Amino acid sequence: MSEPFASPASAREQEEGETFRPRFDAAGLVTAVVTDHETGRPMMVAHMNAEALDLTLETGIAHYWSRSRGCLWKKGETSGALQSVRDIHVDCDQDAVWLSVVSAKPEDTCHTGRKSCFYRRLDSDSRKLVAAHS
């Protein structure tokens, strides 16, 4: 692995500077929003620790930290739905990243077998979940 990430700096440097300084939370994680590179549609939200983020940068394949299993997770390692990272954006204070990816199996992003983990929408009138349009 490469060198550890730079420590967070002043707010101005963190928000306006050119140095990538991911701001990990108390659990050592940053939120990762993942979208389809071609369509821009949301696919999933996950979390990355420093090791997952570093492996993603080194390999170009998305790696995450599974909070439920407490382990590193290479997306698609068992399902074949590997995510090739095309772009990474960081939010203003660098506590979240946005990965634009191409999936080897775009029809199988979610563990439920769907293209996206966002397969339901909230009907605000009934406050019930209904099928989202693909």
Image: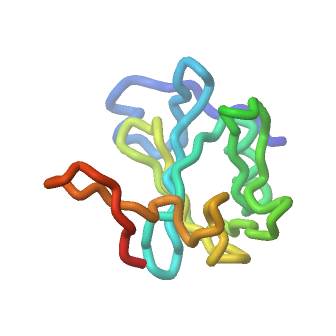
Q: Where in the figure is residue 19, as x and y percent of width and height?
A: 52, 41
Observer-nearest residue: 91 or 64? 64
Residue 31 position (above or below residue 57): above
Which residue is at a point 66% across and 71% down the rendered structure image?
Answer: 108
Residue 31 position (above or below residue 67): below
Residue farthest along the left direction in this orientation: 125
Quadrant where the C terminus is found in the figure: bottom left
Say how many tags the image has.
Answer: 0
Residue farthest along the bottom direction in this orientation: 38
| Display coloring | rainbow
Q: Quadrant of residue 59?
A: bottom right
Q: Where in the figure is residue 79, as x and y percent of width and height?
A: 80, 65
Residue 23 position (above or below residue 96): above
Which residue is at a point 52% across and 59% down the rendered structure image?
Answer: 117
Residue 81 position (above or below residue 17): below
Q: Where in the figure is residue 10, as x and y percent of width and height?
A: 39, 23
Quadrant where the N terminus is found in the figure: top right
Q: Where in the figure is residue 113, as x and y percent of width and height?
A: 65, 67
Observer-nearest residue: 133 or 46? 133
Observer-nearest residue: 81 or 53? 81
Which residue is at a point 34% across and 63% down the rendered structure image?
Answer: 130
Which residue is at a point 46% across and 49% down the rendered structure image?
Answer: 90
On screen, residue 129 versus residue 42, left or right, reads left
